């Protein structure tokens, strides 16, 4: 009787170990794919048509992710064009008209090259909280002003630069980037 009970315990423990091992294998398998997905791929895969950022602050935060990605240069030429397309979706129609895709992409490439030439690295960004943002109505349309700090390392040391984004609600009630200034 003791031998049967011992065998049953061993079989149950063995089966439990197999189940735990298989579960671990599955979680590592899927987790590895997600973890290895580069930032560029994550930005490109964001469906802005169905999952557009809900607030002006979220629009600026996503645009800053795009900027950090531009300067990290962890993408292919084709991916850069797709990332630029995502950035343009965040822009107001007026800004897109002033910056056709070809011109915008060329300006981005020049900016990236200059950034790399100077040995710069953007290591952090900080967007002010919604409570600190300024909201105004201009020509009958709601606008938001969001201050952003960029923290950059270079051969000369670290520096902080600031920029103010101007966003405007469009006809679909989505916040779009109208412009920015330093």
Image (cartoon, rainbow, N blue to C red):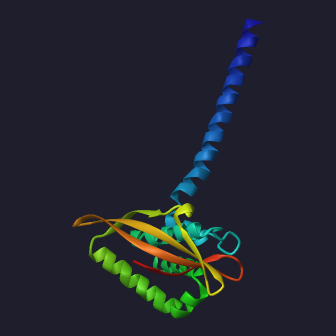
Viewer-closest of 115 and 124: 124
Viewer-closest of 72 and 152: 152
Q: Is residue 146 left or right of residue 114?
A: right
Q: At 53% from the left edge and 67% from the top edge, which residue is drawn?
A: 133
Q: At 61% from the left edge and 52% from the top edge, which residue is drawn?
A: 30
Viewer-closest of 16 and 69: 69
- Spot occupied by residue 160 in the image (x, y as percentages of width and height): 33, 66
Q: Is residue 79 visible?
A: no
Please determine whether, in this image, residue 149 is positioned above or below residue 176.
above
Extreme right residue here? 1
Q: Quadrant of the N terminus?
A: top right
Q: At 62% from the left edge and 36% from the top edge, which residue is drawn?
A: 21
Q: How many marks?
A: 0
Viewer-closest of 29 and 4: 29
Q: Is residue 74 left or right of residue 142?
A: left
Q: Quadrant of residue 130?
A: bottom right
Please determine whether, in this image, residue 18 is positioned above or below residue 103.
above
Extreme top residue here? 1
- Spot occupied by residue 92 in the image (x, y as percentages of width and height): 59, 84
- Spot occupied by residue 97 in the image (x, y as percentages of width and height): 56, 93
Q: Quadrant of the C terminus?
A: bottom left
Q: At 53% from the left edge and 55% from the top edge, which residue is drawn?
A: 35
- Spot occupied by residue 46 in the image (x, y as percentages of width and height): 62, 69
Q: Quadrant of residue 13?
A: top right
Q: Is residue 153 visible?
A: yes
Q: Is residue 103 left or right of residue 54?
A: left
């Amino acid at each position: 009787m003791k031998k049967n009970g011992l065998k049953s315990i061993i079989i149950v423990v063995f089966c439990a170990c197999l189940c735990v091992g298989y579960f671990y294998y599955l979680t590592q398998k899927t987790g590895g794919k997600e973890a290895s997905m580069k930032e560029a791929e994550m930005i490109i895969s964001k469906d802005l048509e169905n999952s557009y950022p809900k607030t002006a602050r979220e629009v600026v935060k996503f645009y800053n992710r795009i900027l950090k990605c531009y300067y990290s240069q962890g993408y292919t030429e084709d991916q850069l064009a797709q990332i630029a397309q995502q950035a343009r979706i965040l822009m107001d129609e007026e800004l897109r008209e002033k910056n056709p895709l070809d011109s915008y992409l060329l300006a981005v490439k020049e900016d990236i090259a200059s950034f790399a030439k100077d040995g710069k690295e953007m290591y952090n960004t900080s967007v002010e909280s919604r409570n600190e943002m300024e909201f105004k109505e201009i020509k009958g349309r709601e606008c938001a002003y969001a201050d952003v700090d960029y923290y950059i390392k270079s051969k000369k040391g670290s520096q902080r630069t600031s920029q103010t984004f101007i966003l405007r609600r469009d006809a679909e009630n989505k916040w779009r980037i109208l412009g920015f200034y330093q």
